[in-house]
Image (cartoon, rainbow, N blue to C red):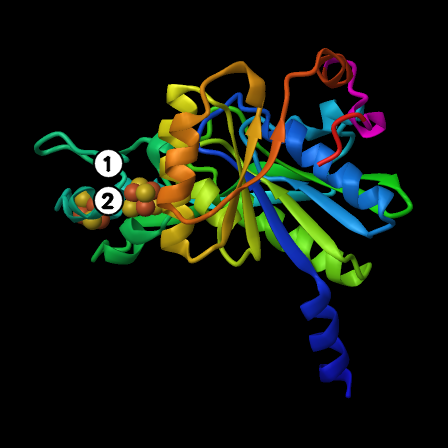
Amino acid sequence: MKKQKLKHRTQKLKKFVITGGKGGTGKSTVAVLFANKFIRKNKRIVLVDCDVECPNDYLLLGQKLGKPRERVYAEFPKLIKEKCTKCGLCAKTCRSNAIFQAPGEHPVFIKELCSACGACWLVCPFGAIKPEKEEVGQIFFNKMKDNFWLITGAANPGLEETGPIVTQTKKFALKFARKIKAEIVLFDTAPGTHCPVITALLGSDLAFCVTEPTPMGTHDLNLILDLCQKLKVSAKVILNQADLGDKKGVKKIVKKFKTKIEKEIPYSKRLVEAYSKGKLLNFQLCQI
Ligand code: SF4
Ligand code: SF4
């Protein structure tokens, strides 16, 4: 009985993703406007900022991040020189090129390139590498309204591999959403088609790809729709600043992927003003 109840609750939770191959297309603005739409329909919604290298949804909502609700850790390799025979196996194994080893020297770990995958300490035949836990990011929490919560993932500055922070932020958000019986979780991803975006997209019900009618917007829309197709995530397109460019290219890509433009948002000075003042939640002109 308990299992049945849990299944029912899980089925009700919709996981939408706001993404876009290109930066600066208004992805975060659209994410907040989407949240706005659902709040006004009295839905219980959790907005999750997964753009962990540069989270900004809290700014658009006029919030401060405050103290972290949870900290995210990763394990990085540390060399035990006395045990190392300089065999070179770890450097050959590392796929991220995060281990530099000059001939006859000890390996040197380049943390900025390390994805914390753990392969090097697993392959070392002499146990000369030990994993060391380190904080790599934080998760923040803001209660916005009775039916609206914001969860923000943030990576420590300079961190190259931010996928684990997106994974943890998603996990935290989904657990919380199920606990409060939310109806919708809205993930706002980083721009691009790299690992953190893939992590945010995996397992979602529908992705809204935000683009603009420019050659770059068209090019990057092709990439993100291709990625969604490969991940088997249904995707629709939101065309932002729709009246400021030539839509032909975007329409061609939309046709190629057999999807549709869900909404065209025209340029609006009022929207830009609301954005810059952190008052997007009060914005009603451009309902999606
Ligand atoms: S695999 Fe182990 S022993 Fe070989 S170079 Fe790397 S750390 Fe040293
Ligand atoms: S943990 Fe993985 S990425 Fe980092 S140095 Fe070792 S093998 Fe390379």
Foreground pick, 221 / 23: 221
Q: Is mark 1 within 8 Å of ligand 2?
A: yes
The percent coordinates of residue 16 (x first, y second) are: 62, 50
- Check disc 1 and report its element: helix, strand or loop: loop
User: What residue is shown with label 1?
Assistant: 97
* Magenta residue span: 276-284
Q: Which mark is residue 204?
A: none
Q: Which mark is residue 94?
A: 2
Q: Which amino acid type is shown beneath numbered disc 1?
A: Asn
The image quadrant that residue 82 belongs to is top left
What residue is rendered at 16% in x and 48% in y?
A: 89
How many residues crowd around disc 2 within 10 Å: few (fewer than 14), some, or many (20 or more)?
some
The image quadrant that residue 81 belongs to is top left
What residue is rendered at 69% in x and 68% in y?
A: 10
Whether label 1 touches label 2, CB < 8 Å: yes
Question: Disc count in the image?
Answer: 2
Foreground pick, 107 / 183: 183
